[in-house]
Image (cartoon, coloured by chain):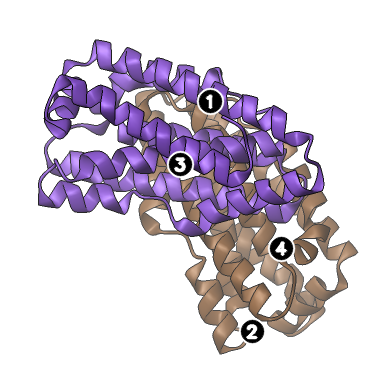
Chain colours: A brown, B purple
Amino acid sequence: MLAYGELVAFDRMAEDARLAPDLARRAALSEMAGAEIVNYGRVAARLADAGVDPSVAMEPFVAPLDEYHEQTHPNDWLEALTKAYVGRGITDDFVREIASRLGPSDEALVLELLHDSRYVRYAADEIRAALAADPSVGNRLSMWARRLVGEGLRQAQRVGVERDKITELLVDATGELSGVAELFARLTSAHTTRMVDLGLNT
Amino acid sequence: MLAYGELVAFDRMAEDARLAPDLARRAALSEMAGAEIVNYGRVAARLADAGVDPSVAMEPFVAPLDEYHEQTHPNDWLEALTKAYVGRGITDDFVREIASRLGPSDEALVLELLHDSRYVRYAADEIRAALAADPSVGNRLSMWARRLVGEGLRQAQRVGVERDKITELLVDATGELSGVAELFARLTSAHTTRMVDLGLNT
């Protein structure tokens, strides 16, 4: 799931970089995309080491993750940046939650996937600057962020229903089935805090 | 020129990766694209160190390099791979030619831009396997490679005419104006050798 998540995030962010209003911003989002494919390589190498073909392992996650991205095509640069920021934030929180349950070597690998705070800060600073320059942007980006999270949860639920192993991992990681709901609640709550920090409504 | 060359190569290879027939091949070309944006970062950092805004430095090369890519949209996976292979080969040869004339710190930087032989070998192996499986592909890819080189030379000429500094650098690197023609002859000849090695006609 993480491997395909990185591969498709690379693909979409590389495309979204074309929405940038200038070369410097285009390069910044392109570099964020580049970090995703480096992460893909780390996960794929770990899978191969474990005797698992990365393509086979990724296959079940292609449809839900593609569907998430199909439903969340950004229309402009700020939507692209907000998508990158929201997606990175939730993915990083999720990775931190599961890392400690994976055994030492996988834990170290998964923690390497956390996004460079430089990129996250860049996206946040850009969004804040845009809101300061034109506060009316806030409503649109707030709605956009809600849509991103709604679509993300919808696909996460689909993965959970179709893939028992993922649900088992999460139940195991959180101790009980109600723990999965609590995990989602924690992810949503941390996301809300980030949106408020940016100056967006949730 | 190198900075924008890397940035746009990243963009186009990331898009071309969608032509891959399966996830493993898509990931391989995506990782090649990732290497381009890492190289972009190296050149941009060097420009910034020298007090040059990378966006300003890149601006004159946007039109010719975009035009090259507009004229060379691959139609399928093999054309995409051939484009990556041909482009990387010629760019690497060019980089080696100019590196020794740039002074020690720039020489070291520019040599870092040479492409990982792993990627180059991957592309060559894929093309050879496709030719072995279906020799009739050879004619089409040979024509495609000729078109890539022709369009590349056309845009290189345009850059040379419009940018005296580049011509000066090359004259300086090769000792005399006729040296520039000889440089192009060496690049073309090395390209021809690579095509013959692959089993393509030139």
> Tag 1, which chain?
B
Q: Residue type at mark 2?
A: Arg
Left or right, A73 with respect to A71, comes to left
Q: Residue type at mark 3?
A: Arg
Spatial CA span between label 2 and label 4 = 16 Å
Spatial CA span between label 1 and label 3 = 12 Å
- Mark in front: 2 vs 4: 4
Q: Residue type at mark 1?
A: Leu
- Where in the figure is residue B182, as x and y percent of width and height? 27, 27
Q: Quadrant of residue B134?
A: top right
Spatial CA span between label 4 and label 1 = 37 Å
Vertical arrangement, residue B169 with respect to residue A46, above or below: above
- Mark in front: 3 vs 2: 3
- Where in the figure is residue A63, as x and y percent of width and height? 82, 49
Q: Residues within 10 Å of mark 4 (few under 14, many from 20)?
A: some
Label 1 with label 3: CB-CB less than 8 Å: no
> Tag 3, which chain?
B
> Tag 4, which chain?
A
Task: Kindly identify which residue carries mark 4.
Answer: A1
Give the camera-side residue of A36 and A149.
A36
Task: Kindly identify which residue carries mark 1.
Answer: B148
One can see residue B131 in this view: yes
Task: Kindly identify which residue carries mark 2.
Answer: A101
Vertical arrangement, residue A119 with respect to residue B52, above or below: below
- Where in the figure is residue B21, as x and y percent of width and height? 77, 45
Q: Residues within 10 Å of mark 2 (few under 14, many from 20)?
A: some
Task: Kindly identify which residue carries mark 3.
Answer: B88
Spatial CA span between label 3 and label 2 = 42 Å
Vertical arrangement, residue B118 with respect to residue A64, above or below: below
Secondary structure state at the residue bearing disc 3: helix
Secondary structure state at the residue bearing disc 4: loop
